[in-house]
Amino acid sequence: MSETTTNTGRFTRDQILTMVSTASLNFSSMIVYSLLGPFFPQEAVKKGVSNTVIGLIFGCFALFNFSTSLILGKYLVKIGAKFMFVTGMFVSACATILFGLLDKAPDGKIFIILCFVVRAVDAIGFGASITASFSILAKAFPNNIATAMGSLEIFTGLGLVLGPPIGGILYQEFGYEIPFISVGCFILLLVPVNYFVLPKYDAEPTTGSFWMLFTFPKIWLMCFSTFSLSSCLCFLDPTMSLFVVETFHLKVSYVGLVFLGLALSYSLSSPLLGLISDKYPGLRKWLFILGSFGTALCFFMLGPATFFHIESKLWLFIFVLVLDGFCIGLSGIPVYPEMLSCAYENGFEEGLSTLGLISGVFSAMWSLGAFVGPTLGGFLNEQFKFENAAAMQGLFPLLSGILLLIFYVYEAFKNRSSEALNKFTAAVYEHVPFFPNPTNQQSVTEEEALVNMNQNIDVLEKAVKTAARKGAHIVVTPEYAICCLDLSREAVYPYLEDIPDPKENWIPCSDPHRFGRTPVQKRLSCMAKKNSIYLVANFGDKKSCNISEENCPEDGHLIYDTTVVFDTEGKLTARYHKVCTLLKCNSLETCVNAAETSSTRFDWFSLSGTFDSQYVFPEVLLSNVQLAPGMFQILNDGRLISLPDIASKPLLSVTLLGRNYKKDPDINVSLLTIS
């Protein structure tokens, strides 16, 4: 298995090689894709091809890419990601060379048919490589896929920047054939290089299906957003060069330079946008919305549309292209990681199979837009001229922005709808957990430990679903419901995970690799988010320490019996390392910070320990109650009660210690309403 993650912030060897291979693909494929723009429409007109058919020739590439991406994404694991990557480049290189020979074909129908056939073959190769590259990249950079993709968009932009001027200059100096043959040979040279450079990643079949993916509304919105951006970008391929030549009277070699504005702004802004998307995933929704509305505005101003009554100026045209490149990156860069997060949140397993599925869908939607954009663009340009055709094209991102805004407003309203409630429903339950035999203190592997814990989490998940279905807002699960009763320090270690500080603003369901290996936290987070419920759970935390420091064990790790809280978005909002007050303070009085709190829709959520570390208390405190030490009276049986002066204020206290209760093999979800 290839090494794919690093906790030090440094790239591994496999990650660097993956970046090199993917960069070469992005650069070469975008040169091929943008090569035709400055001169092919004029050459096709000489061959008796109409503007509409020219648009179809541009668009057929994307149409075949669309169907190919869906199929190849589904069967990525069986075909092999590396094989698909390298073979696709080889096929695309050969097709590019063949396209350069089409000027020898007779005018009319034969030329048109050959253009369609060669472009279709090129699309299949291109689709295979791109689909594989997305999957490989996500596998290599699980913690920061948007940053990696954004950084590589520099090479995408570089290809888009160099393609048109290279094509225009070579065409003007040497004719039709040389641009395609030279670029095709360059890609052929990259094939053996990538065969030896690109690491091979293990593939694990998963249970998620293509059709299941499309049952989630967010996936549909992400697909339409991708489609709208792609259609706008590719609308320019068959239309912009003709408009620039006719309106501003530029030479073909200069037309390619006009493309620089869009490509440069897109490629230079993409790394920063990717970094923001990874570091602040909560901002992605605003990036989508602003980018969509910004792209729509740019296309309305590209001509500008005749109803603005603004004269076309070259400086204005270039300025709008620059702004458009930034806006497309604003919406486009976060789409893939957001689709991936949505799949993980809804139960899709991690691995190349899921990555291939998401990559296939993403590539297919981009390709569908790349088909509709030039096809519709050629027709609209012929019927309404470029100024109004561009404005009509801008309706796609405008609609996308409106739909995204409605979706996120609805989602925010749904999540906050109970903020003003003066009552809530809490669910508690007990079950008989599965534990390894405590007489066998032999250590197991992390994989074996996860298998043991998943047996208990399966039961927990059913209880959470039942509680959510019955209208509970919070579900409190038993102590040791996941692991690890009566195990020694050595035996319990494989069951532990690094539980970070809630200040990290972390949603494990969406970003499971950010703090290393955290499958339990990911699953708990996804359960809370999928069921839109607050989830309280108990398991073990491990923290590294310096053995030279006081209280640091010889193995260099501190182990904590820990209770965590995940909110309705799956975010880790509280982490409580339980304190044995009796041992720490030599009394029943709290002498340490005995509570960790988190703000919720119910005001405050508190996790408190009492005189024995076997007890932990989650409390939901209602209006006007401020949490402070000494606020509660601790009874001998471990219960917390409000002090007399605040006795009228409501308090829910639930003990989590499963083994102090009579065991019931059946799940019993109790609902308690406090007003």
Image (cartoon, rainbow, N blue to C red):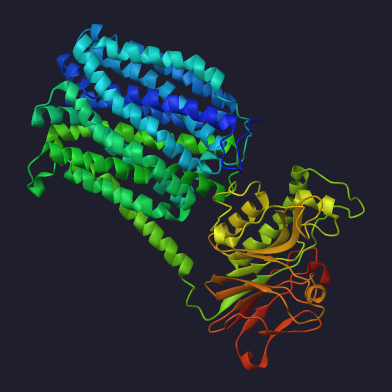
**Residue that appears at 74% across and 48% down:** 450
Name the residue nearer the viewer: 452 or 151: 151
| Visible residue check, residue 570 | no
Location of the C terminus (image quadrant): bottom right
> Which residue of the protein is positioned furthest toward the bottom in this rendering?
645
Percent across and percent down for residue 133 are 49, 30
- Residue 412, given in percent of the width and then of the height, sits at 43, 63
Q: Position of residue 200 (x, y in %)?
A: 60, 26
Q: Residue at x 44, y 28 (%)?
A: 23
- Splitting the image into 4 quarters, where does residue 34 fall? top left
Quarter of the N terminus within the rendering: top right
Q: Is residue 504 left or right of residue 113?
A: right
Give the left or right position of residue 429, taking residue 386 as reference.
right
**Quarter holding residue 571:** bottom right
- Residue sitting at x 78%, y 71%: 580
Residue 107 against residue 362 in the figure, above or below: above
Q: Residue furthest front?
A: 548
> Relative to residue 208, is residue 162 depicted above or below?
above
Residue 264 vs 505, above or below: the answer is: above
In the image shown, does 183 or 404 lie closer to the viewer? 183
Q: Report the side of 547 relative to 219 (left or right).
A: right
In the foreground, 107 or 259: 259
Residue 610 in view of the camera: yes
Q: Which image quarter: residue 636?
A: bottom right
- From the viewer's perspective, is residue 628 above or below residue 43? below
Residue 487 shown left or right of residue 309 in the figure: right
- Residue visible at 52% across and 72% down? 601
